[in-house]
């Protein structure tokens, strides 16, 4: 890495030190070769009944060459980029920053129009998954992004919401719209339960306890067979209805017959999409509003400096608990939506990797940025779908994309913090 | 107004304050000077309830506040500008000031804001700027202004001169004098910069190793040869 700096910093009229750049590229290629030897060059394969090795030297050579050329180009480019302040990405971020409201509105319009323009099952299905993650990201953003409390067990609240709906709906037959607020309440309650023991913890220690909390919930779900169905989960969860009108074939009292249209399974999927779009939009509006209220301000102040908060008369206990409870509540909403959509829940859906993905969305987006969450969710949810054609290299490319983002934007895609208030509009001060 | 009576404070086994008595009367600027590690900041923090006094009493306007949680002091009329300024770096100047006014009557907010800006015009220029991008002196101004937004009757200041250039220090101390004179605010100032602090203060206390060794008016202490030798010679 030190060599890289030398290569970049080498003076000269418009030129740069080719030798140093080549040397650095050579090093990168060497590392690629070392890594590629077991990963690419050797492949275990079946020979009849026996397992044998296939050698793929050509693949290894291509990889090494690609790394060499890539590294060289990167040095070349980064040397030139120095002149423009912070590069294209920063300018791009600033542009987004100054048109936040417009972009948000445009996003919402696109979201609403999507099923009209593209009433395709697969597209709507992916869009719904995307919106679930956006909502989870926005929920976790309250805890991690605004209040600065690193929560690695957020999936626990998602699970609480999901099981709340699954259990209540399948036992008592209550409708989704009745259970939804209940699920949010239960999740918020669990948020407070988690909040109390971790009030004094911060940073790494907090992360470990929340990680443990997430696992505890999952292990309880697996082992409390009588109540949760154990590893088999709960199936046959009642599907969503259009405020009481079921989405099925029939002449009376169904969605299709009420509106006098032919039944189609895609109607339910589109309706589900609009439900999550509404829920997510409400989450966003709620958070935006909270940021302007004393509680929301105090969340951010707490993230910045807890001691200063105390000296200003803010009670950190209440503020932390409210952040945990509200973040958890939105996780609960998303969870109950998850179970009404899938019709089936099991502990497998609530593993640590889910927490990690949601946290990745928040961090990639730039902690605390609402729009950043949307963009990051797009990368995390849509990108693996786009890469589906690459089959076995899908996750490799996904990981590469993550790394590229973090190298270029180490503070997240949109790391600008939008002030909650300006004394004068920008135009006036110009 | 504030009576600190025989206060002992411990950090684990270490006794940081060994029976401290300090009185601050209404309308005064009282300063506490002493070298590094004497226990000055500890005394201020003990008044704020973290760490708590193991022995002794802290009385504010006749009420025992020894066991009060830190965040309740603001509503009683004590505001603190903690050591190292501790502004909220990612929030704007304006938002920082809003945070200070969180516990006070919103009706006064605009007037208080105008007053802060009148006192520190630099803050007005930079009201939409992130506090983390301010200079050290500006951050100190912001920390004081933020504490004032809580409309306290007693202002606790912990080393406002820390790490600031002499000219900036003078500006800050002038501001403290103005706050005391024009707003009749009582100030308890903890300082290492003995010369400036004693010149400013009505009365002063000297702390050595967790004990008050000397007390007197600012002018008296300034003239005291021991103090001159220990804290003033060589500097300024």
Image: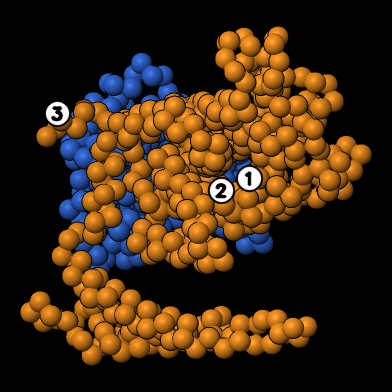
Chain colours: A orange, B blue
At 19% from the left edge and 85% from the top edge, which residue is drawn?
A: A17
Task: Residue A396: give x, y in percent of width and height.
Answer: 52, 67
Image quarter hosting the N terminus of chain A: bottom left
In the image shown, does B70 or A257 lie closer to the viewer?
A257
Which dot marks residue B62?
none
Q: Kindly indicate whether the residue at mark 1 contacts the one at mark 2 (C-beta within 8 angstroms).
A: yes
Q: Nearer the viewer, mark 3 or mark 2?
A: 2
| Marked residue chain, label 3 | A
Looking at the picture, does residue A243 appear above or below residue A393?
above
Label 3 residue SS? helix
- Local crowd size for mark 3, using a 10 Å CA cut-off: few (<14), some (14–19), many (≥20): few
Looking at the picture, does residue A129 appear above or below residue A176?
below
At 66% from the left edge and 33% from the top edge, which residue is drawn?
A: A341
Marks 2 and 1 share the same chain:
yes
- Report which residue position mark 2 lands on: A358
Mark closer to the chain start, 3 or 1: 1
At 62% from the left edge and 28% from the top edge, which residue is drawn?
A: A265
Which dot marks residue A154?
1
- Report which residue position mark 3 lands on: A428
Image quarter hosting the C terminus of chain A: top left
Compute the Cα span from label 3 to label 2: 39 Å
Marks 3 and 2 share the same chain:
yes
In the image shown, does B169 or B228 lie closer to the viewer?
B169
Mark closer to the chain start, 3 or 2: 2
Q: Quadrant of residue B142?
A: top left
Q: Nearer the viewer, mark 3 or mark 1?
A: 1
Return the residue found at the far left.
A13
Q: Is residue A40 shown left or right of residue A177? A: left
């Amino acid at each position: 890495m030190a060599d890289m700096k030398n290569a970049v910093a080498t003076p000269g009229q418009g030129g740069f030190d080719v030798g140093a750049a080549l040397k650095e590229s050579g090093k990168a290629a060497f590392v690629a070769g070392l890594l590629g030897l077991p990963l690419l060059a050797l492949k275990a394969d079946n020979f009849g009944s026996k397992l044998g090795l296939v050698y793929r030297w050509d693949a290894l050579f291509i990889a090494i060459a690609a790394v060499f050329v890539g590294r060289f180009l990167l040095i070349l480019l980064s040397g030139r980029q120095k002149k423009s302040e912070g590069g294209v990405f920063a300018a791009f971020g600033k542009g987004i920053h100054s048109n936040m409201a417009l972009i948000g509105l445009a996003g919402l319009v696109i979201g609403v129009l999507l099923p009209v323009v593209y009433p395709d099952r697969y597209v709507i299905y992916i869009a719904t998954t995307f919106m679930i993650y956006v909502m989870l990201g926005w929920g976790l953003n309250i805890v991690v992004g605004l209040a600065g409390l690193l929560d690695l067990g957020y999936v626990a609240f998602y699970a609480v919401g999901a099981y709340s709906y699954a259990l209540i709906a399948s036992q008592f037959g209550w409708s989704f719209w009745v259970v939804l607020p209940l699920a949010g309440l239960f999740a918020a309650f669990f948020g407070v339960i988690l909040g109390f023991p971790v009030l004094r913890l911060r940073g790494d220690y907090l992360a470990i306890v929340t990680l443990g909390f997430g696992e505890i919930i999952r292990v309880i779900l697996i082992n409390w067979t009588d109540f949760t169905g154990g590893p088999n989960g709960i199936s046959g969860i009642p599907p969503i209805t259009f405020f009481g009108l079921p989405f099925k074939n029939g002449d009376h009292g169904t969605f299709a017959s009420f509106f006098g249209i032919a039944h189609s399974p895609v109607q339910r999927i589109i309706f589900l999409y609009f439900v999550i779009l509404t829920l997510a939009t409400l989450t966003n509006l709620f958070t935006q509003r909270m940021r302007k209220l004393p509680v929301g301000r105090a969340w951010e102040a707490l993230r910045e400096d807890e001691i200063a908060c105390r000296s200003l008369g803010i009670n950190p206990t209440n503020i932390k608990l409210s952040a945990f409870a509200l973040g958890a509540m939105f996780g609960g909403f998303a969870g109950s939506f998850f179970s009404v959509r899938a019709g089936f829940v099991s502990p497998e859906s609530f593993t640590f990797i889910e927490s990690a993905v949601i946290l990745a969305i928040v961090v990639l987006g730039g902690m605390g940025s609402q729009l950043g969450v949307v963009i990051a969710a797009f990368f995390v949810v849509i990108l693996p779908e786009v890469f589906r054609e690459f089959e076995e290299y899908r996750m490799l490319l996904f990981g590469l994309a993550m790394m590229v983002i973090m190298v270029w934007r180490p503070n997240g895609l949109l790391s600008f913090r939008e002030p909650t208030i300006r004394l004068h509009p920008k135009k006036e001060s110009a | 107004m504030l009576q600190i009576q025989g206060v002992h404070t411990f950090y684990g086994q270490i006794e940081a304050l060994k029976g401290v008595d300090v009185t601050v009367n209404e309308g005064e600027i009282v300063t506490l000077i002493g070298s590094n590690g004497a226990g000055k900041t500890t005394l201020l923090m003990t008044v704020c309830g973290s760490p708590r006094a193991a022995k002794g009493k802290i009385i504010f306007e006749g009420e025992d506040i020894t066991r009060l949680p830190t965040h309740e002091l603001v509503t009683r009329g004590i505001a603190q500008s903690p050591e190292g300024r501790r502004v909220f770096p990612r929030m704007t100047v304006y938002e920082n000031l809003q945070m200070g006014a969180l516990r006070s009557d919103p009706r006064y907010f605009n007037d208080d804001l105008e007053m802060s800006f009148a006192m520190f015009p630099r803050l007005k220029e930079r009201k939409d700027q992130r506090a983390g991008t301010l200079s050290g002196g500006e951050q100190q101004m912001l920390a004081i202004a933020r504490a004032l937004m809580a409309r306290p009757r007693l202002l606790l200041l912990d080393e406002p001169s820390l790490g600031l250039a002499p000219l900036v220090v003078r500006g800050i101390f002038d501001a403290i004098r103005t706050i005391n004179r024009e707003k009749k605010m009582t100030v308890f100032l903890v300082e290492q910069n003995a010369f400036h602090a004693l010149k400013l203060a009505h009365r002063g206390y000297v702390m050595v190793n967790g004990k008050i060794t000397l007390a007197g008016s600012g002018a008296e202490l300034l003239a005291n040869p021991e103090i001159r030798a220990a804290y003033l010679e060589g500097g300024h």
